[in-house]
Amino acid sequence: MGRAVAILVVTATLATACASGSVDGSVEPQAKPGGRSFTVAAAGDVLIHPELVEQAAKDAEETGEGEAGLDFGPLLAGVKPVIGEADLAICHMETPVGKPKGPFQGYPEFLVPPQILTALKDVGYDTCSTASNHTFDHGLKAVRRTLDAMDEVGLGHAGSARTSEEAEQINVRDVNAVKVAHLAYSWESFLNPTPEKQSWAFNRSSTEEIKKDEGRARKAGAEVVILSVHWGLEHYNEPSVPQLELARRITEETGIDLVIGHHAHVVQPIQKVNGTWIAYGLGNQVARHSSPTGLTEEGAIGWFEFRETTEGGWDVTARYRTTLVDIPPEVEPGEELPDGAVEDHRLVDVQHQLDHPDGLSEERLARYRLAADRTRGFLYNRGAPGGDGLKSLSLEE
């Protein structure tokens, strides 16, 4: 074949592929004219360490708000413009809550103020996953207290249950006239495993259980099923082999529409697997580890837009927004803060900070740029930008 003919053949092939929607000739889903759509925001672990309880006490003194001397509102306020914009916002409540006045505990057996739930609701969260390796840190009594407190503030929940009857229920919500189910599962704690007689209270990760519950969700009318899963290895930015294998099985053997991952406390990639978006790990939404690494303060809000297609399914596009927990340095009473240091723990929207740099020190700007660049690298580390279309979220879109 001559060179000119070869060029014509390749050009024709590309033209045919583009007309059908992709270079490999596969047909891209087409949005249904007048079809339904909705957006989902999902973020990483909500892990309230003792330093954040102290911050909430300090903020309550200054604002005069909150319950029992604790106000988590200022801590979380930085992400409200993003979370509050979504049609459905999903958080991951890593730990059980105690009573409003305590006592509270940190790692390894968490018991955190229920006031954090009020702040999560005020920021714009609608529902939360509650399945994690800390779910049973204080037994079934704390599980029940946590779900009662979530009901009281109007937060939905999935992943744990107060009774065997509740364990059979599926969290299905009406989102822009679309029935959306939220399921949640986790590996079980070795320190505080669920007693066999109460095994119904906690959703253990299992492809078979996920398949069964998806089926029940569909029978309950769910048109979209979103899965939260607690998995992987802590402080590793790459998904583990078991994560990759479970992601493969979920995308091959179920009709799950979106997978949201937690547990690593650092950002892991977002990519499409067999046509389904997998957020392997969104890092921490808010935390203050005893030994901050820099990576444990960085997180991502995953933003997913669902559009109804002419084929009757859903086309999903993915965006992300980088977050960072600003941490003040430890100084002795009377000492001045170092240049560029912050005075309070604050969860910030990194892109907003970079877009509005007035008043920020060069040190803070450098920290925000590092968070943005590093998060982008981790999110794209399995090739998402090339073939999957993952992009940074602009609130003006």
Image (spheres, rainbow, N blue to C red):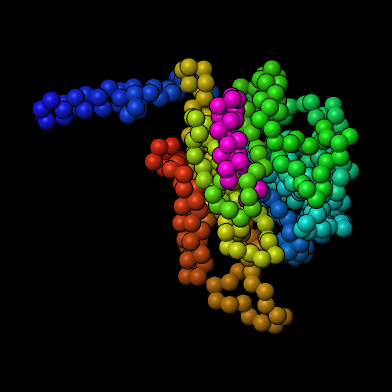
Q: Position of residue 209 (x, y in %)?
A: 71, 28
Total number of numbered labels?
0
Tell me the quarter of the image containing the C terminus: top left
Relative vertical location of residue 358 with respect to residue 99 in this rendering, above or below? below
Asked if one can make out residue 96 in the rendered structure from this viewpoint, the answer is: no
**Image location of residue 84, percent across then percent down:** 61, 43
Q: Position of residue 281 (x, y in %)?
A: 59, 46
Please check the rendered image and state whether residue 7 is part of the magenta-colored stretch, yes or no. Answer: no
Between 8 and 244, which is closer to the camera in this rendering? 244
Apparent side of residue 375 relative to residue 168 in the rendered image (left or right):
left
Q: Nearer the viewer, residue 275 or 19?
A: 275
Q: Quadrant of residue 91?
A: top right
Query: Considering depth in this image, is 236 or 70 the residue closer to the camera?
Result: 236
> Does the magenta run of residues contain 248?
yes
Name the quadrant of the N terminus: top left
> Does residue 14 show up?
yes
In the image, residue 207 sits, relative to residue 74, either above or below, namely above
Residue 155, image quadrant: top right
Residue found 58% across the figure and 71% down from its top: 341
Which segment is the magenta one?
A: 240-264
Residue drawn at the location 52% of the way across and 31% of the way down:
276
Q: Position of residue 376 (x, y in %)?
A: 47, 51
Q: Is residue 11 left or right of residue 84?
A: left
Rendered residue at 58%/46% (across/down): 240
